[in-house]
Amino acid sequence: MVTQHGIKLAVHLITNHFGNLVGVILSLSRLSDLFCSGIDIEILCVQKVCENLFSHGSLTLDQLIRFTELTKDQVKNSLLVLVQHNCCQAFVSAPEDDDDDADRLRVRTQYLVLFDNIIHRLRFPKFLETVTRTLDEECVELLDGLLRDGRLTLKQMVDRASQGKGKCFMMPVIENAVETKVVREILCKLLTARLVERCPAPEPVVSTSFKETTTRKRGAKSAKIFEAPETLEQRVLEAAVPGDAIRYSFTADMGSNADRETNSDDEQMISVEENTAKEEEILWRANFEEFVRHLRHKALIENIRTQHDDGTATVLSAVLEATKTVEKKVKLENSVPLSLDTITAEVMKTDTGRTMTMDRIRASLSQLGCSQRMIVDDAYSIDLKKIIERARNEEVESIVLKRYGRDAYRMFRLLSKDIGFHDTDQIAASTLVEKKEAPKLLYKLWKDNYLYMEKVVATGVKQITILMWKVNKPLLLEHVLDEMYHAALNLSLRMAFEQEKDEELLNVPKDKLKEPGPLQKKYKRLLNVWLLLGSSLMKLDEALMLFHDF
């Protein structure tokens, strides 16, 4: 769900993250012919390309040149920046049935901006925290390089580790070089945890025509079931991502050679050397999907811990940990079914779960409201969607309470729990709100898009217009999400403004800042403002993920 303020936030993040360097210097070995020692790209070019991709959807290179009014090299360089940092995906439009021979022979490469990947740039600190919690410091440093520099090969990771943070990894002089074997082992840890993956196919072939698909159940009187249409972005990403066997594999040669046993030793040595050279050229990137899954699981567990207790949260955590490798997608509505014995074994692995009895585990599963499926054994599946929806409802209700007061909160809560329409008098009587105040509060909620209203004309002795109210959940969630994007944009703009206003302080030596005086006060104020705005943005991002990513 991409909203108007969501697009503005994404464009601002692109401008802010790449604009700090005044220009973006690409240091990719595969682009050395184009960029030699690094060519400065004006951030305005990247911003224009990004804005037009959001405005017009997927575009070809010629269309981008026409819409942005930039030169061909500027557009190319901007696209390379976006692709390098996983913010854009190229794809080839498959020929359609009604195309003539000339159209079929023409290669039509289009570029699609990836909204979610741009917004994920807000979550880089959370991604690093996840690795800090689950792995070691070396893995954190390697992931930090992938988040900062985008797509990297093994050779580039080795160069970066050898030269330290903050230095260009293409410098010819290397001191205290790190062995390739060491970096390879660290990368293997991240691959095992699925926190790093191979980069997707550079230009997958995708059909851009959408046909309405329906499924019909058996039976003469069964109705057609219309599924939500698949978006172009989903289709492109699905076509670009390799299978799991390749996606998380370090081996360059995935095929089996039947004649390998008959080859000579020299040929085998050459094959090993070629394989090693290929491994060093494979491009890797951070797996945002897996990080979002980790954060979703964390949010689910903490929500259950707040609502119930530590025991119930431990059971949910054990179920999610046991099934995370077989989850097909992030937004899973129900957990993968598990038998009670399997759940008990997973619970017993945790410190809290060792003291839990079988009856306590059954009671926790009952509290989680999981359904019991009779497959081979008794298999329990937890309704994860219900937990997320409850958390969303609580978030919206807290917004209404803070913004409109206790009376409006009670009326909104009544309408939120009941699907149907209610008239003004009925709402006022059910929530014990004065009849004079109820219409005013309901009108405020309706004006701010928190309620849906319909006018019903009752005919009789006297014609009366009755106002009917209800909560339209899909429209409400979209509106709340857009408001959150707007708030995140305002916070980001304020942080950028404060940094630009006191930019001179960043160039002052630290010794002078420690001395008592106006400079120290100004610097402390800047740190406090950054801390307040940064923590507020991180807290707001948790709500953004709840409504958009979970």
Image (spheres, grey):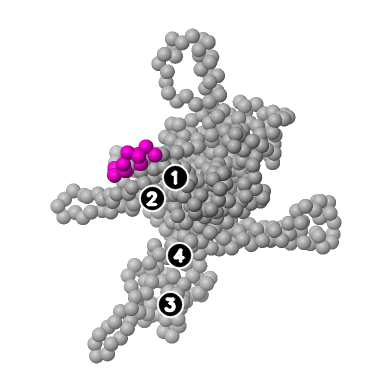
Return the mark for residue 231. Answer: 2
Query: Residue 389's image quarter?
Result: bottom left
- Mark 2 or mark 3: which is in front? 2
Q: CA distance from mark 2 to mark 3?
A: 36 Å
| Kind of residue sitting beneath label 2 | Thr
Q: Which residue is mark 1?
A: 110
Query: With 409 as the anchor, is 176 left or right in this view?
Result: right
275 or 22: nearer the viewer? 22
**Residue stretch in magenta:** 96-106
The 10 Å Cα crowd at callout 1, few under 14, some 14 to 19, many 20 or more, is some
Return the mark for residue 479. Answer: 4
- Mark 4 or mark 2: which is in front? 2
Return the mark for residue 442. Answer: 3
Residue 67 in the magenta stretch? The answer is no
Task: Answer above or below: position of 274 versus 137.
Answer: above
Query: With 292 as the anchor, is 220 left or right in this view?
Result: left
